[in-house]
Amino acid sequence: MDTTLTQPLADSDTYKAQSSSNTVAQNADKLDEQTFIKQLLNNNRKRLQSFPDKQTAEEFIEELFRFLFVGEAQAVDEERLSEQYKSLKNTFAALLFEVVNDETTVKQNTTQFFSALPDIHQRLIKDAEAILASDPAARSIEEVMAAYPGFYATVVYRLTNQLWKQDVAFLPRFFSEYAHSKTGIDIHPGAEIGDSLAIDHGTGIVIGETTIIGNNVKLYQGVTLGALNVAKDCASMKRHPTIEDDVIIYSGATILGGETIIGKGSVIGGNVWLTYSVPANSVVYHKSEIKVKDKEPFPEPLNFVI
């Protein structure tokens, strides 16, 4: 006796219903994709109306840096340097027009920015000299200008700070984030930094928007000058610390808070965590505990695995 169970064949109406259901589902997916593409298109149009071209912005800041400090073999006379200068002004004006879309505003801001370049250049020479004086590995000021990431980040900061003061939108952050991606040093354009800033190594340094730094300050890698409170309603407050003149902050130190002041001439040691002010000429350091293995077995103080 055959005991095989068989399912009844679906009738033609059932097949039609299933086919219709699948078609509706496929059309719904297509509609969702079309809606998504339209949303992206609208968003892209909005961005293009207010954002400068990212690649052009990055190329401009590179060209401006080379113009100011590195030079090019073909630009060895005044005429060619003047041509480069005009080209930079035209590129900057084009970038700015994408942001403000007003010729009068573009002309005013372009004139103001390039008029400030000679003073910015002189301040940056002091920054390079400070790095040369404090770093035994530096052989010449030309080496500092051409090869040191700390100097590059400082150059871009001083240029973006000028644009920040002019209330230029987007461009300062485009430039500063490019320098951040290239050097690992994150300096907000709104920070106030005095003369002769020396950044040694520099990777991992973070300097927040409302930070104030005096003259002759030296920062090592991994230093964070940050905020204690990151709530959005505190955006208009001073959230980051004040570092007075002649301060040295060693690697890995974290200093937080808008009311935190590091007094003139102080030395902040590596890996220090500070959320309060210290007076002038203070020495703040992280104390390491040393134990000699004088017995067996020696209890492992750092009991963890990775």
Image: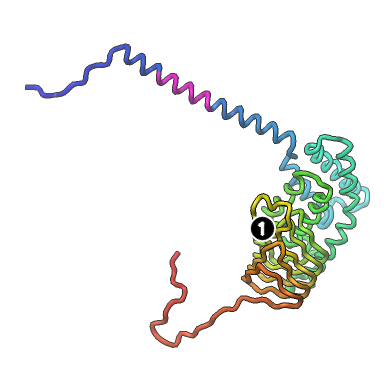
On the image, the x and y values in percent for residue 42 come to 65, 29
Q: Residue at x 67, y 66 (%)?
A: 255
Residue depicted at 69% across the width and 53% down the height? 234
**Residue 25 colored in magenta in the image:** yes
Q: Is residue 225 left or right of residue 116?
A: left
Say above or below: 231 vs 3. below
Residue furthest toward the left? 1
Q: Which residue is mark 1?
A: 184
On the picture, is 123 further left or further right than 211? right
Percent across and percent down for residue 146 are 77, 60
Image x and y of residue 257, in percent: 68, 62
Residue 141 visible in this rendered orientation of the protein: no
Mark 1 Cα within 10 Å, few/some/many (few <14, many 20+)? many
Magenta stretch in the rendered image: 21-32
Give the position of the N terminus as an image quadrant: top left
In terms of secondary structure, where does tag 1 sit? Answer: loop
Magenta highlight: main SS = helix
Type of amino acid at the residue the image marks with label 1: Gly
Image quadrant assignment for residue 22: top left
Front residue of this view, candidates 186 and 277: 277
